Image (cartoon, grey):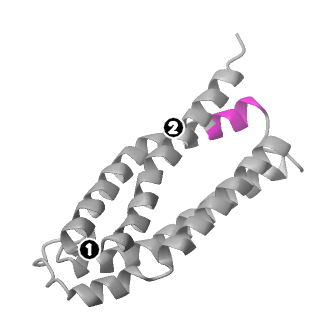
Amino acid sequence: MNWYPWIVAAHVIGAFGFVLAHGASVIAAFRMRSDPRPENVTALIGLSGASIAVMYPFLLLLLIGGITAGFVGGWWDQLWIWVSIGILVLIFGAMYGFGTPYYIRVRHAVGLSAPQDKDAPPPEAVSADELAALLRSPMPEILALVGGLGLATIVWLMVVKPW
Protein backbone atom coordinates (compact mmCIF):
# COMPACT_ATOMS: atom_id res chain seq x y z
CA MET A 1 0.00 0.00 0.00
CA ASN A 2 1.22 3.49 -0.85
CA TRP A 3 1.04 5.54 2.36
CA TYR A 4 2.25 8.79 0.79
CA PRO A 5 -1.23 10.14 -0.19
CA TRP A 6 -2.51 9.40 3.33
CA ILE A 7 0.44 11.19 4.89
CA VAL A 8 -0.04 14.21 2.64
CA ALA A 9 -3.77 14.17 3.49
CA ALA A 10 -2.90 14.23 7.20
CA HIS A 11 -0.54 17.15 6.53
CA VAL A 12 -3.24 19.06 4.63
CA ILE A 13 -5.88 18.32 7.31
CA GLY A 14 -3.42 19.64 9.90
CA ALA A 15 -2.94 22.78 7.82
CA PHE A 16 -6.70 23.34 7.42
CA GLY A 17 -7.33 22.77 11.11
CA PHE A 18 -4.48 25.10 12.02
CA VAL A 19 -5.81 27.88 9.78
CA LEU A 20 -9.41 27.36 10.92
CA ALA A 21 -8.54 27.47 14.62
CA HIS A 22 -6.10 30.34 14.24
CA GLY A 23 -8.61 32.24 12.11
CA ALA A 24 -10.81 32.77 15.17
CA SER A 25 -7.91 34.59 16.81
CA VAL A 26 -7.38 36.76 13.75
CA ILE A 27 -11.06 37.72 13.64
CA ALA A 28 -11.04 38.45 17.39
CA ALA A 29 -8.01 40.73 16.95
CA PHE A 30 -9.86 42.85 14.40
CA ARG A 31 -13.23 42.69 16.20
CA MET A 32 -11.76 44.22 19.38
CA ARG A 33 -11.40 47.51 17.55
CA SER A 34 -15.03 47.84 16.58
CA ASP A 35 -16.23 47.47 20.17
CA PRO A 36 -13.35 48.25 22.52
CA ARG A 37 -15.36 48.01 25.72
CA PRO A 38 -13.25 46.14 28.29
CA GLU A 39 -15.84 43.37 28.73
CA ASN A 40 -15.94 42.81 24.96
CA VAL A 41 -12.15 42.77 24.67
CA THR A 42 -11.95 40.36 27.62
CA ALA A 43 -14.45 38.00 25.96
CA LEU A 44 -12.58 38.15 22.66
CA ILE A 45 -9.28 37.45 24.39
CA GLY A 46 -10.93 34.37 25.92
CA LEU A 47 -12.18 33.26 22.50
CA SER A 48 -8.74 33.81 21.01
CA GLY A 49 -7.09 31.80 23.78
CA ALA A 50 -9.53 28.94 23.30
CA SER A 51 -8.91 28.89 19.55
CA ILE A 52 -5.15 28.88 20.08
CA ALA A 53 -5.50 25.84 22.35
CA VAL A 54 -7.31 24.01 19.50
CA MET A 55 -4.69 25.20 17.02
CA TYR A 56 -1.74 23.36 18.61
CA PRO A 57 -2.89 19.75 17.96
CA PHE A 58 -3.49 20.67 14.33
CA LEU A 59 -0.06 22.29 14.16
CA LEU A 60 1.42 19.06 15.49
CA LEU A 61 -0.45 17.05 12.82
CA LEU A 62 0.71 19.51 10.16
CA LEU A 63 4.35 19.16 11.24
CA ILE A 64 4.33 15.37 11.68
CA GLY A 65 2.55 14.92 8.34
CA GLY A 66 4.88 17.31 6.53
CA ILE A 67 8.08 15.87 7.97
CA THR A 68 6.91 12.30 7.31
CA ALA A 69 5.86 13.22 3.76
CA GLY A 70 9.34 14.69 3.28
CA PHE A 71 10.91 11.34 4.13
CA VAL A 72 8.41 9.08 2.35
CA GLY A 73 8.35 11.31 -0.74
CA GLY A 74 12.12 11.72 -0.79
CA TRP A 75 11.90 15.53 -0.76
CA TRP A 76 14.75 16.33 1.65
CA ASP A 77 17.24 16.86 -1.17
CA GLN A 78 14.97 19.54 -2.71
CA LEU A 79 15.49 23.22 -1.89
CA TRP A 80 11.76 24.07 -1.79
CA ILE A 81 11.14 21.99 1.35
CA TRP A 82 13.99 23.69 3.22
CA VAL A 83 12.80 27.14 2.13
CA SER A 84 9.29 26.22 3.30
CA ILE A 85 10.60 25.18 6.70
CA GLY A 86 12.66 28.38 6.91
CA ILE A 87 9.61 30.50 6.11
CA LEU A 88 7.58 28.62 8.72
CA VAL A 89 10.25 29.27 11.35
CA LEU A 90 10.35 32.96 10.38
CA ILE A 91 6.55 33.19 10.64
CA PHE A 92 6.60 31.62 14.10
CA GLY A 93 9.40 33.94 15.16
CA ALA A 94 7.56 37.03 13.91
CA MET A 95 4.25 35.98 15.44
CA TYR A 96 5.82 35.28 18.80
CA GLY A 97 8.24 38.22 18.74
CA PHE A 98 5.71 40.83 17.67
CA GLY A 99 2.33 39.35 18.56
CA THR A 100 3.00 38.09 22.07
CA PRO A 101 4.17 41.42 23.53
CA TYR A 102 1.28 43.26 21.88
CA TYR A 103 -1.37 40.86 23.20
CA ILE A 104 0.21 40.86 26.66
CA ARG A 105 -0.26 44.66 26.61
CA VAL A 106 -3.89 44.23 25.52
CA ARG A 107 -4.51 41.69 28.30
CA HIS A 108 -2.93 44.01 30.85
CA ALA A 109 -4.94 46.96 29.51
CA VAL A 110 -8.20 45.22 30.46
CA GLY A 111 -6.82 44.06 33.82
CA LEU A 112 -6.03 40.47 32.88
CA SER A 113 -2.83 38.67 33.75
CA ALA A 114 -0.88 37.04 30.96
CA PRO A 115 0.40 33.46 31.21
CA GLN A 116 3.93 34.91 31.44
CA ASP A 117 3.01 36.89 34.56
CA LYS A 118 3.18 33.75 36.75
CA ASP A 119 2.22 34.70 40.32
CA ALA A 120 2.07 38.47 39.85
CA PRO A 121 -1.18 40.19 40.88
CA PRO A 122 -3.53 41.16 38.06
CA PRO A 123 -2.61 44.50 36.48
CA GLU A 124 -4.71 47.62 36.81
CA ALA A 125 -6.98 48.19 33.81
CA VAL A 126 -6.35 51.32 31.76
CA SER A 127 -8.93 53.93 30.74
CA ALA A 128 -11.28 53.34 27.82
CA ASP A 129 -9.38 55.92 25.76
CA GLU A 130 -6.03 54.24 26.46
CA LEU A 131 -7.49 50.84 25.54
CA ALA A 132 -8.95 52.19 22.29
CA ALA A 133 -5.59 53.78 21.43
CA LEU A 134 -3.79 50.47 22.05
CA LEU A 135 -6.28 48.61 19.87
CA ARG A 136 -5.67 51.05 17.00
CA SER A 137 -2.16 49.62 16.68
CA PRO A 138 -1.33 48.25 13.23
CA MET A 139 -0.10 45.03 14.86
CA PRO A 140 -3.11 42.88 13.82
CA GLU A 141 -2.59 43.91 10.18
CA ILE A 142 1.15 43.26 10.39
CA LEU A 143 0.62 39.81 11.90
CA ALA A 144 -2.12 38.92 9.38
CA LEU A 145 0.08 40.07 6.51
CA VAL A 146 3.12 38.13 7.71
CA GLY A 147 1.08 35.00 8.38
CA GLY A 148 -1.02 35.23 5.22
CA LEU A 149 1.83 35.94 2.82
CA GLY A 150 4.04 33.38 4.52
CA LEU A 151 1.35 30.71 4.31
CA ALA A 152 0.61 31.55 0.67
CA THR A 153 4.32 31.30 -0.16
CA ILE A 154 4.61 27.90 1.58
CA VAL A 155 1.55 26.60 -0.30
CA TRP A 156 3.06 27.84 -3.58
CA LEU A 157 6.35 26.10 -2.80
CA MET A 158 4.60 22.81 -1.94
CA VAL A 159 2.47 22.86 -5.09
CA VAL A 160 4.97 24.19 -7.65
CA LYS A 161 8.16 22.69 -6.11
CA PRO A 162 10.31 25.16 -8.07
CA TRP A 163 13.70 23.82 -6.96
Q: Nearer the viewer, mark 2 or mark 1?
A: 1
Sooner in the amino-acid sequence: mark 2 or mark 1: 2
Q: Residue at x 51, y 37 (%)?
A: 61
For mark 2, give the secondary structure.
helix
Asked which quadrant contains residue 149, the reply is: bottom right
In screen coordinates, is 120 left or right of 9?
Answer: left
Q: Position of residue 124 (x, y in %)?
A: 14, 85
In screen coordinates, is 63 left or right of 71?
Answer: left
Q: Main secondary structure of the magenta part?
A: helix
Please report the bounds of the magenta region as a residue range: 66-73
Task: List the residue tagged with mark 2.
Answer: 61
For mark 1, give the secondary structure.
helix
Q: Is residue 114 magenta?
A: no
Q: Position of residue 147 (x, y in %)?
A: 59, 62
In screen coordinates, is 162 left or right of 102?
Answer: right
Residue flagged by tag 2: what amino acid is it? Leu
Q: Residue at x 31, y 77 (%)?
A: 106
Q: Position of residue 115 (x, y in %)?
A: 25, 67
Task: List the residue tagged with mark 1.
Answer: 107
Asked which quadrant contains residue 74, the reply is: top right
Give above or below for 57 relative to 137.
Answer: above
Q: As rendered, which of 33 and 139 lies closer to the eye? A: 33
In screen coordinates, is 40 left or right of 8?
Answer: left
Q: Position of residue 99 (x, y in %)?
A: 45, 72
Q: Is residue 69 magenta?
A: yes
Give above or below for 115 relative to 22.
Answer: below
For the N terminus, the quadrant is top right
Give above or below for 92 relative to 112.
Answer: above
Q: Residue at x 75, y 57 (%)?
A: 83
- Crowd around label 2: few <14 · some 14–19 · many ≥20 (10 Å): many
For the residues labelled 2 and 1, the Cα–Cα distance comes to 29 Å
Residue flagged by tag 1: what amino acid is it? Arg
